[in-house]
């Protein structure tokens, strides 16, 4: 009975489908007789949604684009048994066949570097994204080829946990969606799938995710304030400046803060980063006479030296503290209206505990 059913199903195939299946099989056998290897890649949910040429450029990451397009034109690379253009958006289950010699594939694939390992504080994780509490001193992503960043540590974590395999990395690599300065701690969003990366990047670009930081600044502030200005960047020196009026090449910025606690000569602020420009919080607060303590670029060196001597402060006291998600549509709708917090690090509490009661400190948590 089973055999009869299989025969019936075969007979019901469209003639063009049967012809295509036969052509594909014959093509495969013909290439094998010529000694050409055949590798088959099956698209999973993790890498679905990207263009075929982008996926191929990741798999054969040393190959020039002209080579990839030439192979597609000659049907040495096919998508679901057909000639491909490269602009197709791949979907789960799609089959990509590469009729290339093993030597060619090896030539165009860079060797896998040893994946470094470091314990990470994972604040939240699901199928598509994870949130990490990045420590001071860690790069969010590489600035130079030889750097090791949070991305490399995340990759190692996902490999070790089984969420990724080395084979998966040939088609997709996890990445961070927002970046923090090396010496700023706090929440970083990372994408485990292309859908997670695309959704988080879109929400950040639209400023739909509300980002709140905590910092300790020089001076005693008693009232909140909404700041607007223009930021200009000196790329050569990796510095920015803030002015009240627009200048050539400057970008508009908006920053809002409210004081949470104050001590002798310092204030703990919660800062709402409305626009997300490079060094924005650090430069904006310094421009109004309240630099972040410990900041080597925009801070007061005299105060920084006192903080180092008294509290061991070795970096700016700036921390990405809280994220508030908007209503989210689609597969990541479960994140709608959720809030995530990265607790303030110990280096903050060394200063906050000076002259504060336990009940006052409890209100800051």
Image (spheres, rainbow, N blue to C red):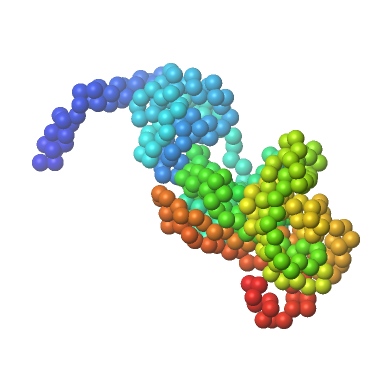
Number of numbered discs overlaid on the protein picture = 0
Quadrant assignment, res 321: bottom right
Q: Nearer the viewer, residue 29 or 329?
A: 329
Q: Given the current orientation, which residue lies at the most extreme right position?
A: 302
Is 224 situated above or below 113?
Answer: below
| Vertical relation: 5 (above or below) 38 | below
Depicted 68 relative to depicted 47: above or below: above
Question: x%, y% of residue 365?
Answer: 63, 72
Task: From the viewer's perspective, tell me whether residue 258 is left or right of residue 219.
Answer: left
- Which percent across, then down, holds residue 86? 45, 26
Viewer-proximal residue, 37 or 185?
185
| Residue in the image at 54% along x and 21% along y | 66
Residue projecting furthest to the front? 245
In front of the other: 146 or 326: 326
In percent of the image, x 78 and y 40: which residue is there? Answer: 234
Residue positioned 72% across, 48% down in the render: 229
In which quarter of the view is residue 226 placed?
bottom right
Can residue 67 be spotted in the picture?
Answer: yes
User: Looking at the rendering, which quadrant does residue 52 occupy?
Assistant: top left
Quadrant where the image shows the N terminus: top left
In percent of width and height, residue 27 lies at 34, 21
**In the rendered image, is residue 150 in sight?**
no
On the picture, is 109 further left or further right than 195? Answer: right
Look at 50% across and 52% down and name the residue there: 129
Picture coordinates of residue 46, whole percent (x, y): 45, 45
Q: Is residue 17 left or right of residue 9?
A: right
């Amino acid at each position: 009975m089973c055999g009869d059913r299989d025969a019936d199903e075969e007979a019901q195939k469209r003639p063009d489908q049967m012809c295509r299946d036969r052509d594909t099989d014959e093509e495969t056998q013909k290439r094998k007789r010529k000694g050409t290897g055949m590798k088959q890649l099956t698209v999973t949910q993790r890498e679905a949604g990207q263009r075929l040429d982008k996926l191929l450029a990741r798999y054969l990451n040393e190959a020039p684009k002209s080579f990839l397009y030439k192979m597609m034109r000659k049907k040495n690379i096919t998508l679901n048994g057909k000639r491909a253009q490269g602009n197709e958006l791949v979907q789960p289950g799609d089959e990509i066949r590469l009729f290339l010699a093993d030597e060619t594939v090896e030539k165009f694939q860079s060797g896998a570097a040893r994946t470094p390992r470091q314990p990470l504080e994972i604040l939240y994780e699901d199928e598509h994204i994870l949130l990490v509490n990045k420590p001071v001193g860690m790069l969010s992503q590489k600035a130079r080829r030889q750097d090791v960043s949070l991305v490399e540590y995340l990759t190692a974590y996902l490999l070790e946990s089984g969420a990724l395999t080395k084979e998966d990395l040939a088609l997709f690599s996890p990445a961070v969606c927002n970046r923090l300065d090396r010496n700023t701690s706090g929440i970083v969003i990372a994408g485990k799938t292309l859908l997670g990366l695309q959704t988080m990047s879109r929400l950040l670009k639209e400023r739909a995710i509300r980002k709140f930081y905590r910092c300790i600044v020089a001076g005693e502030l008693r009232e909140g304030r909404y700041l607007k200005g223009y930021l200009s960047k000196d790329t050569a020196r990796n510095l920015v400046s803030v002015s009240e009026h627009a200048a050539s090449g400057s970008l508009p910025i908006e920053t809002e803060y409210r004081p949470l606690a104050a001590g002798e000569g310092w204030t703990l602020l919660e800062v709402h980063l409305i626009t997300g420009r490079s060094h924005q919080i650090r430069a904006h607060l310094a421009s109004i006479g309240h630099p972040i303590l410990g900041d080597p670029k925009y801070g007061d060196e005299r105060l920084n030296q006192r903080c180092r001597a008294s509290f061991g402060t070795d970096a700016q006291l700036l921390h990405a503290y809280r994220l508030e998600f908007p209503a989210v549509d689609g597969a990541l709708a479960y994140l709608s209206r959720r809030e995530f917090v990265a607790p303030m690090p110990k280096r903050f509490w060394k200063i906050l505990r000076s002259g504060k009661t336990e009940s006052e400190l409890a209100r800051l948590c």
